[in-house]
Image (tube, rainbow, N blue to C red):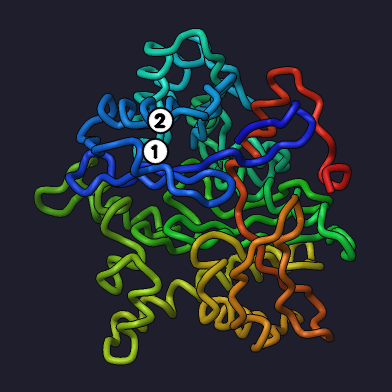
Amino acid sequence: MYADGWAQLRTLYEGELSDIGEATAALTMKDAAGKDLASAVGAVKAGSMEEAIDVFQRAIALPGLKPPEAVGYRVVHPGPKLRGHQRLTAEVLADLKQATAFAPLHDPAAVEMIEVMMRRAPEVPRFACFDTVFHETMPEEATVYALPAEVRAEGVRRYGFHGLSCESIVMQMRAAKGRDFPRRMVIAHLGSGASVTACVDGRSVDTTMGLTPTGGVVMGTRPGDLDPGLMFYLLRRAGASVDSVEAMLNHAAGLKGLGGNNDMKELRAAAAGDELARLAIRVFCRSVVKAIAGFMALDGADALVFTGGIGEHDAASRQEIAQGLAGLGVAIDAAANRLEHVEPGLGVGRNVRRISEVNSRVAVYVVPAEEDMVIARHVAEMCGVSLPSERESQ
């Protein structure tokens, strides 16, 4: 992302280096006009973080590309000491290293990447944007665990995640022309990781994920909420260890554990002849329905927003979830739901798509997650740049 004169953020170029650590590592990169840039970077070798960063540095050094003036990183968990997004310093990095115990699936790789980049280019200011910050507005009764005080004093509480995604949804819903901003909104971020968040006046008041991104609704490879007694059972099994149980719950459970595959598209394709695939889909949708219904019972809902890979692209899951919420006033327009939003619009709020029936008591939308843009805005603000509001940027 780049701030054109720091007045209006726009994308100059974007890319992704996937499968780091694997022989299948690949780079995709294009400019704002859609021109492929990856071929100019050369061979991609990313067996380690150092090699991956080599590829990245070659990519941003291509002729005609401006070097970055600041860098923002998405970091899942800040741990108990940090609040708000942070400029990365030695002290902040030390706190992040301690926080890896709270998010061992996500934070270690992020910390490693930050350390390497800070060592290679120490002159570029760098910032950590956390997935938890959006949820700092939750009331205490939504964050506290019913555990002894000495445990809670260690920072054990419900943090919530997918906050950058949720913030992007709020921004886009505020900026959407011709629509009133929904005061009570439920956001269903459904993808390989999945969560449901309740917002009132654009602020998080509750969410399904807790201390870590493993809890809440069923996900691609994670089970969501479990009976605590089940954890004791798993740990007492022959040969079990904390590491083996953690690996199971983070990599082998959820849709994969039930249906043998964590890709919803592939599960849908197999469902006609595979009962386990059908069961996995039913369990996933039911868990999402229960979460949404619970938040609607607590605070009501004027709008339900689907986002994330499944939320944006799997019409069947949206339809099944909506059917489970029919008694609460959710009615989807089948034709609008099936229509893929192929041509993205320009500017914040242009990609908000309503898929509910006209008489639905709860408006239903599909909105793409724009986490990168949210990170860019926070980085600009932490650099002291004054950006226009969502409506002013239209």
Q: Quadrant of residue 359?
A: bottom right
| Label 1 residue SS | loop
What residue do we see at 51% from left, 42% from top? 14
Q: Is residue 109 above or below residue 371?
A: above
Looking at the rendered image, the disc whose residue lies closer to the viewer, 1 or 2, is 2
Label ID, residue 106 = 1
Residue 89 located left or right of residue 283:
right
- Total label count? 2
Contact (CB < 8 A) between labels 1 and 2? yes
Label ID, residue 110 = 2
Residue 13 in percent (x, y) is at 54, 40
Q: Nearer the viewer, residue 26 or 74?
A: 26
Residue 173 in percent (x, y) is at 78, 57
What residue do we see at 10% from left, 52% from top? 238
Residue 181 in percent (x, y) is at 86, 58
Dot 2 amino acid type: Ala
Residue 215 located left or right of residue 337:
left
Q: Is the N terminus in the top left, top right, bottom left or bottom right quadrant?
A: top right
Dot 1 amino acid type: His
Q: Is residue 281 above or below residue 191?
A: below
